[in-house]
Amino acid sequence: MTEQAKHAPFDVIEKGHKFVVRNDVGRTVMVCTDQPSALHYAQLMNAAFDAGYKKGRRERS
């Protein structure tokens, strides 16, 4: 796991037969039926989140 992945605000967990994309406080953002889709969405959301920080829109806590 990379250092960036450790601090990524969105992650994926398996819950039953579904894959849940959660934010950094544990709230469900979306649920997917397959892991590749969930991982892809988490990666896109993390990239968008990081892009906001690079533009100075937010401060990382």
Image (cartoon, grey):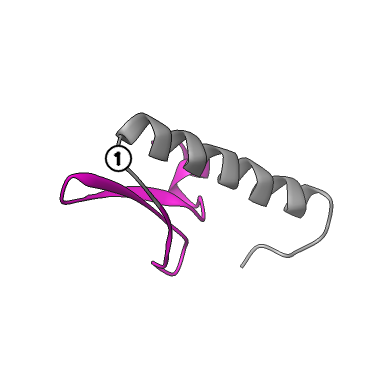
Q: Residue 18, how many percent across, how many down? A: 25, 46
Residue at the (81%, 61%) spot, across then down: 57
Residue at the extreme front: 33
Residue 24 covered by magenta stretch: yes
Q: Quadrant of the N terminus?
A: top left
- Left or right of residue 56, residue 2 in this image: left
Q: Secondary structure at mark 1?
A: loop
Residue at the (74%, 54%) spot, across then down: 53
Residue at the extreme top: 36
Residue 39 covered by magenta stretch: no
Residue at the (30%, 34%) spot, across then down: 34
Mark 1 closeness class: few <14, some 14–19, many ≥20 residues within 10 Å: few
- Left or right of residue 32, residue 23 in this image: right
Q: Which residue is mark 1?
A: 33
Q: Residue 36, how many percent across, how many down? A: 37, 30
Which range is magenta?
1-30
Residue flagged by tag 1: what amino acid is it?
Answer: Thr
In this view, 16 is above or below 41: below
Total label count? 1
| Quadrant of res 37 | top left
